[in-house]
Amino acid sequence: MSKRYIANLDGLRFLAATTVACSHLEVVKSYATDYSFDNRFIKNAPQISVTFFFVLSGFLIMWWFLEETKGNVQKINVRRFYINRISRTWPLYYLVLAISVLISVFDGTLFEGDQALKRFAFYLFFLPNSADIFHGANVFMGPTWSLAVEEFFYLLFPLILIRISQQKLLKRLLQLAAATLVFSLLFNPIFISLAAGNEIQLPGVVKYLSVIADRYRFYSFFLGAAGAYLVFAHVRLPGFFETMKAKRNMQLLALLLLLLFIFGITFSFATQQIYSVLFALFLYLMTSATYRSKLLNIGFIRTGGKISYGIYMLHMLVVIRLVNPLNFLIPTESKFLNVLVSWMLMLGLTFVISYISFRYFEMPLRNRIRRSATISVKNES
């Protein structure tokens, strides 16, 4: 069944991915050069962007399930969903892993002690968060922590949905969002310190749970999924939300989110939770109002959205290779000019590499995996 294209989402995905890339460039530059750009946006934008990715993933996955099953998610074809997700995400993940291992071999760090080998063993089994927690992150594999969170959600979400009746679906999604949100707050280290009234050393298990609560933002996915259901089922909400669907009001919410994002505004221990609610509300309002932004649907930006996975996964390879030898580019007293040129160079190279990867590696391999799986199913039947 063909899926309805939802305007603006590719453009939003592209902007979020490029924000992460630019922020990471500035962080790396701060260690290697005197020309880094340091402010609240650079510090907070990557995490907020990842939260947006999580909300958007929940929204899109739920939308696809609803379209495929005409609203009865108990009829989800779980096997086909798994194959589609694996064929889309695994090839590039393991390509980046192979490149990271090769770089470690050539620079001599792979066999310095046993940390690198243990780290890559975790990465091999798609456990980057465990690798980061127990053995430290590999710089090139750093972005994969959020991919692992998404993969875990992909694994569990259809198994949860096929057990929920159509009549209780929205209620269960909101309950799951509330439960995971409360868990994320209770085990947030900032919240624990505030509740205890001082800085405390967290016990091992609690510290591990705090990392999981911070990274595995399942409330973001469930809030996005609830937003998709509201749009798909044409659920009428209280008058305030109906009024917000008006183009002007929806644009005001978009402007508010943009300002919060640009100025790197945080909300203590509830930052990602509050942004998740705002992002889910924004996607619901924008989609239900069938609003189409001219900027977000420019051909180049839409293409960037389609290759945003590659931009997210590959940008650190470009960042590290650029910063070390160039150190950095043009020694000028104008920090703005340096930042502008460095961002353009990094984003340009990342875009080209990501497009080549998408066109000549990811798509062909994805199609081959899906064809093989289809043939296998036919042979079994």
Image (cartoon, rainbow, N blue to C red):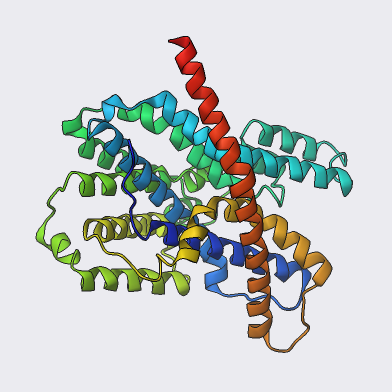
- The residue depicted at 59 percent of the width and 48 percent of the height is 359
Q: Is 118 placed above or below 358 here?
A: above
Q: Which residue is at the front of the view, 11 or 62?
A: 11
- The residue depicted at 22 percent of the width and 35 percent of the height is 71
- The residue depicted at 25 percent of the width and 68 percent of the height is 250
Where residue 4 sits in the image (x, y, percent)?
A: 31, 47
**Number of marks present in the image shown:** 0
Where residue 124 sits in the image (x, y, percent)?
A: 68, 33
Q: Is residue 199 left or right of residue 184?
A: right
Where residue 3 sits in the image (x, y, percent)?
A: 33, 43
Where residue 119 sits in the image (x, y, percent)?
A: 72, 38
Q: Is residue 137 left or right of residue 176?
A: right
Looking at the image, can residue 332 be seen?
Answer: yes
Q: Quadrant of residue 100?
A: top right
Q: Which residue is at the front of the view, 100 or 381?
A: 381
Looking at the image, can residue 207 be seen?
Answer: no
Q: Quadrant of residue 332?
A: bottom right
Which quarter of the figure is the C terminus placed in?
top left
